[in-house]
Image (spheres, rainbow, N blue to C red):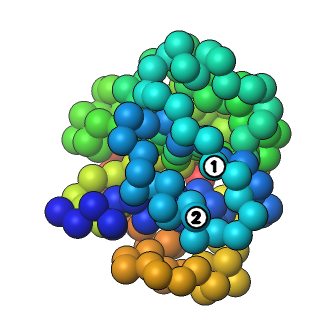
């Protein structure tokens, strides 16, 4: 699959949903592609840490507008991700396939303790990610002028962004009462 699709979706969905992002934290052991995507936004500071709990524990409280995580996380890791987010921050994180219902319900329930909105979205690669936002809704609050001003994108755009959150009825029924939108 095209790596650029994954990197663009993991980064731009969060950065184009948050009203005024200044700081992003990428939690990954292979962040180069995502760092290149962040660089397409003017004035955003990008920090990268290893995808492990020890590195996350050392991250500064309330510093980040957006956290993008490739870490296999548990309740403790999600609590630390919440701790480093600002009051209106949001998290974009990988998760198991939506077919793994029990594990995803647990993840979404944990994230729901910290966020007003918790929604899976299609990465365009056959995989999905989860967006957990303390304030902004990814389809209602998309910053269209920011999506339109980005140069050098091969996949992500202002049409792909809201479409990524469209889910089939079986997903909606399976996760009814768990997803917060």
Q: What's the distance in space between the residues labelled 1 and 2, CA to CA?
A: 8 Å
Q: Position of residue 56 (x, y in %)?
A: 58, 22
Residue 106 in which image quadrant: top left
Residue at 70% over, 70% down: 42
In this rendering, the answer to whether 157 lies above or below 2 is below
* Left or right of 140 in this view: 53: left
Q: Which residue matches tag 1? A: 46
Callout 1: SS: strand
Q: Position of residue 170 (x, y in %)?
A: 28, 54
The residue closer to the viewer here, 31 or 61, is 31
Res 44 visible: yes
Using the image as rendered, state which of residue 137 and residue 170 is in the foreground.
137
The residue closer to the viewer here, 90 or 32, is: 32
Query: Which residue lies at the image location 58% right of the left edge and 80% below the top edge?
Result: 150
Residue 116: image x %, image y %? 69, 43
Which residue matches tag 2? 39
Is 142 above or below relative to 145? above
Please report contact status of discs 1 and 2: CB closer than 8 Å, yes or no. yes
Regarding residue 140, the answer to whether it shows in the image is no
> Which image quarter holds the N terminus?
bottom left
Residue 81 x, y percent position in the rendering:
61, 29
Q: Is residue 73 positioned above or below 96 on the image?
A: above
* Corner quadrant of residue 3: bottom left
Residue shown at the point (71%, 58%) measured from the top left: 44
SS at mark 2 in the image:
loop
Residue at left 75%, top 64%? Answer: 43
Does 36 sit left or right of 116 as displayed?
Answer: left
Residue 74 is left or right of residue 151, and the answer is: left
């Amino acid at each position: 699959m095209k790596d650029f699709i994954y990197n663009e979706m993991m980064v731009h969905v969060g950065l184009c949903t948050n009203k005024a992002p200044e700081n992003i934290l990428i939690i990954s052991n292979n962040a180069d592609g995502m760092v290149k995507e962040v660089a397409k936004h003017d004035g955003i500071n990008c920090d990268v840490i290893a995808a492990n709990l020890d590195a996350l524990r050392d991250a500064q409280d309330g510093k980040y507008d957006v956290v993008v995580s490739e870490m296999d996380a548990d309740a403790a890791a999600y609590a630390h991700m919440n701790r480093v987010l600002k009051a209106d921050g949001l998290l974009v994180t990988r998760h198991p396939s939506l077919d793994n219902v029990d594990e995803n319900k647990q993840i979404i329930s944990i994230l729901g303790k910290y966020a007003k909105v918790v929604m899976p979205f299609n990465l365009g690669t056959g995989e999905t990610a989860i967006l957990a936002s303390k304030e902004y809704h990814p389809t209602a609050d998309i910053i269209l002028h920011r999506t339109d001003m980005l140069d050098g994108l091969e996949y992500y755009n202002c049409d792909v962004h809201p479409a990524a959150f469209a889910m089939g009825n079986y997903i909606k029924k399976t996760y009814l009462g768990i997803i917060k939108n």
